[in-house]
Structure formats: structure tokens, C-alpha cells
Image: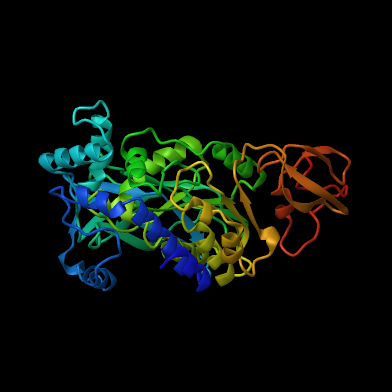
Amino acid sequence: MSLKMAYKNYTPSTLAIAMQLKTRKENKFDEIESRLSLAKSSTIPLAQGQSRLTSWLNRFNILQPFAKPATDNDIVWLLDNTAYKSVRTGTWQAEFVAAVFEREDKETLMDMVTRVMRAVGLADDAVERDTVEERVLPFLWDIRPATIVTASQNSKELKLGPTNMNGLTSNMLKISSSNSGSLVKASTKIGGGRGSIIKMQTYYAGEEGWGIISDIDDTIKVTMTSDPVGILRETFINAPAPIPGMPELYSEIKSFLPKDAAWFYLSASPYNLYPFLKEFRKQYYPPGTLILRDSSWKTVAGLLSALTLRTEEYKVDRMKKINRWLPKRNMIVIGDSTQSDPEAYGEMYRIMPGWIRLILIRKATDVAAVGIDEKNEPERFKKAFKDIPRDAWHVFEDPREKGTEIFDKPSCANQSSRVVLNGIINIGREQCNGGRALAHSFLHGLMMHPGENKHPVNEKNQCRDCTT
């Protein structure tokens, strides 16, 4: 379906699919994927969804009777998570995710590394080979279905598993109580050695407050999702780089939100990239839970298709899960224009009215993406955010730009003032109701209590969110 036809017969999904298919066709994704898939390890098809058999086996836990415990010869990953209070029972619980792999065959590893090097135009003996070898490893490990991982948290044993056909286990478990905003560690004593992640932490998110859901690829990290060779370079060769200005923006957002704000980083990447993306997030952005596709493909080609197929559908599904965990939170969602973030966020806003308070979209003008001009057309954003209040969604280009006017918001009680941003965040001075000169941002107006038209005040009738 052409983009013109997708606009005519508009639904969020049809437009997202049309844009992705056009990008894949014009940038020859299929050709690059077929070259990578010739490696000996590529026994699992591209990331176009699970087979019916795999889905059926996972759903009905058919592997349970055959489950065996993980051993020290296995590679075990424990993924960080977010705990929440059950709406029904009031008890703390969290989804615990673990992955189990077998170590790779050396011949297979060398074969895949060589193919990645050649795909991006590097010689077989280039100095980048060691980096490629290290990063491609998680795509080549054999997954271990029907495996149980035993971990401990607060002296309590956690039984995770058995793993499904993708080598993953996802268990919703009741856990010990803790204060909102606290971090509690968990660990396992098995599956150590190179590549294992045997320690994790659980963030306790209270029922109410604020939350951030952020896309990763080309929103906060340079990924080049519209270019198959660019994806390979940014994933396996180059040092992971943040989008200029975004670390500062996120730091500023973090400073304006309460300390117990819950952060989620949502990517269409397969979970094979968890260690890589976790380290990147740790270096540049506030702590938060990484949410990745829960399928594994033993081929690098699977990475390319994961980032360019059915991303809108996938992200809406994951946001629904976060909503089930934290339905009373006020969410800010942040994405970019290169793929389907506007359509996914718009759809979620309409499905769950009142949950998303603000949508921020980075208009990507710094990438040579196929159809990027069409993706940045105002008409696209208007359709994506149909029936959504205009002051609830905002499109920006460079958060470092000065003097960008986004919208008007009352900054304090009985005072209306124009919020002029220094890029996205304004560090300009404005006068508060209490008579003090204070720093404000566009978020300042959103920090009002839901349903109120003014900020809460203290005993001196001063804005409590503003006074220091």
C-alpha cells in the first residue's frame, strides 16, 4: 500500500505499515537480510512474529513437564523490572523476566562476524572485528527452552520459568513490600561466566504520580532505523551515541518530576540487545526499565526486521501492559518521526483517555531516511493525533535550539504567561505568585494536580511546586 493510499484509507496501523514497507523496499532491507541469513546459524525465520506452533506451546506451557534447572554451563540473564501494587489485592508484584542460553559454536560466530563486516563494507581483518564479535554473540547463542532459573530477593526464593520456545521466562510474582521509589536487588548463583547477567534490581513504583515512556531508536539513541547498513553499523561497530541534546532534555525532565517518577524505555529491538542497550541507557539517561521484544532470532537479519515491521502494533501492546500496572499514573510519552511512534502514541491516548498527559515527538531531520519529508508532514501528525487536544502533543526538532515557542500554559495561580523554551526546556526567569524569580519549563504547567487550574500552594499562598 502506498503512503498516498494509506492517508486516504487512514488508520494508525495502515499508515505505519505503509511507511515501514516503503522504507524497507527503497533501502533494500530484504537484500541485506538475505545476505546475513546465509550464515550457518540462521535456523530461525525473520522477526515477523512467532509461528503458530511456538505461540501455542508458550501459551499453554506445554514445556512444563520437561523443564530442567539451569546449570553453570548456561548463560543466564536477569532483567531489571518495575514493581506495582495490584489493583485487586493491594499487594506488591512484578513481572520477572529471565533468559537462558547455551554458549555459541566458534565456527558459527566467525561466520556471522565476517558477514556483518562485509555487509557494512569492512575488510575481514578490520580493527572493528573484535567489537563486532562481542556484540553479535547474543544473537548466536542457542536458546534454552524448558529451563528453570532460581533467584533470590530479600532472602525469598524466586522460581522463574520454565523458559518458553524463545528461551525467555516471564513470571508475575508477589514480592515483599517496600517504599515507593525504592530499589531492591535480586540475584542468582547459577549461570555465571562471560555474558551472564546474574544481578538485577526491582524499582517500586507507587500507584499514583508521574511516569515516562520513551522510545529508544532514533529518539534518544542514533540507530538509523531507516537504513539496514546504518542499523548494523550503529549496533555492531560504532560506539552507541545519544541524539544530540536529548540527554540534557531528559535530565531536565527528571529534575522537574517527583523523585518517584517511573521511567520505561520501549524499543522494538529483540531482547538479544538487552546488555548493549542497558549500558547505553546507564551512561546517558535516567534509570528505568527496558522493555524489548520478547522473541529471539538466531540471525542478525532478525534485528533488521524487528526494527522495521509491526512496530506500532508492538508498542501499543506494551503500553497497554504498563497501563495495567500503573493505571493511575500520569504518563509522558516521547518518540520520533522516523517510524510509527506518532501513530502508536495517538492510538494509546485514545484507547486510555486521561492516562497520557503529554506526547513529545522529535521530528527527525538529521537522518537521510527514505520518505522522511512525508513522515514529517504536518498532515501526518494531525491524523496521528486526531481528537487529541492540541496542547497535549508537541513536535520539536532540536532540543538545543533557542527560543522555540511550543505552547502557552499558566505558570502559577492567577497568572498566565507564555512559556518560551530554550529548545524544549526553558530556563528563563518568570515571576511566581509568591514574588520569587524562579526557573520554569514547559513541564511546569503540566505539574498541576489533575483537574485543577492552579498549582498547589503552601501556607504562605506560594506555589509549592515552585518555591525552594
Query: Which image quadrant: the C terminus?
Result: top right
Q: Is residue 85 left or right of residue 150?
A: right
- Of 295 and 127, nearer the camera is 127
Q: Residue furthest left?
A: 107
Q: Residue at x 21, y 48 (%)?
A: 36
Q: How many marks?
A: 0
Q: Is residue 304 left or right of residue 85?
A: left
Q: Is residue 347 placed above or below 193 in the rendered structure?
A: below
Q: Looking at the picture, how far across and down is residue 254, in whole percent?
A: 61, 43
Visible residue check, residue 95: no
- Of 410 and 290, nearer the camera is 410
- Which of the 4 quarters of the picture holds residue 128? top left
Q: Looking at the picture, how far across and down is residue 7, in whole percent?
A: 52, 68
Query: Which image quadrant: the N terminus?
Result: bottom left
Q: Residue at x 57, y 37 (%)?
A: 245
- Of 218 and 95, nearer the camera is 218
Visible residue check, residue 191: yes
- Which of the 4 quarters of the picture holds residue 391? bottom right
- Which of the 4 quarters of the picture holds residue 50? bottom left
Q: Is residue 217 placed above or below 164 in the rendered structure?
A: above
Q: Looking at the picture, how far across and down is residue 442, in whole percent?
A: 71, 48
Q: Is residue 238 left or right of residue 189?
A: right
Q: Is residue 289 placed above or below 1 in the rendered structure?
A: above
Q: Looking at the picture, how far across and down is residue 22, in whole percent?
A: 39, 58
